[in-house]
Amino acid sequence: MRQYETLMLFSPEMLGERRQEILAMMTGIVEQAGGKILEEDDWGMRTLAYPVHKQTRGHYVRLEYAAPGQVVAEMERNLRITDGVFKFLSVKLADTIEESKEN
């Protein structure tokens, strides 16, 4: 398994419960494929460098996980069709996962 990171930008008007539902869906995709969530980091509301969808603020959440490669494509497919997700970015952090982080 490889180590990935996905950063998501949510609408500032989105309720916290809906944001948690989306994160639970993303976590489910990773775990269903045999992966594991290593870290979930809620950065909170931030001012954007430029307007996105006519908004100047957004809520950032970062997920770090270990999973097979096809999981990233499935997560991005789901994020693309989910309302309230402005942008997202997935990056491969490592080709192999360290045992200390996985446990």
Image (tube, rainbow, N blue to C red):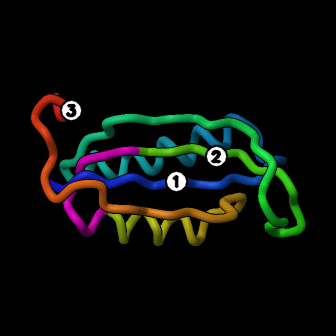
Question: Of the residues shown, which amino acid type is indicated by label 3?
Answer: Lys
15 or 12, nearer to the observer: 12
The image quadrant of residue 6 is bottom left
Q: In the structure shown, which secondary structural element does the residue marked by tag 1 occupy?
A: strand
In the figure, 6 relative to 73: above or below? above
In the figure, 54 relative to 10: above or below? below
Q: Looking at the rendered structure, which numbered label has been put on residue 7?
A: 1
What's the residue at 81%, 65% (across, down)? 50
Q: Looking at the rendered structure, which numbered label has been put on residue 101?
A: 3
Q: Which residues are magenta?
A: 64-71
Distance (Cα) linking label 2 and label 3: 23 Å
Q: In the structure shown, which secondary structural element does the residue marked by tag 3 occupy?
A: helix
Q: Is label 2 in contact with label 1 (beta carbons under 8 Å)?
A: yes
Q: Tag 3 or tag 2, which sits nearer the N-term?
A: 2
What's the residue at 24%, 48% (across, down)? 66
Mark 2 lies on residue? 60
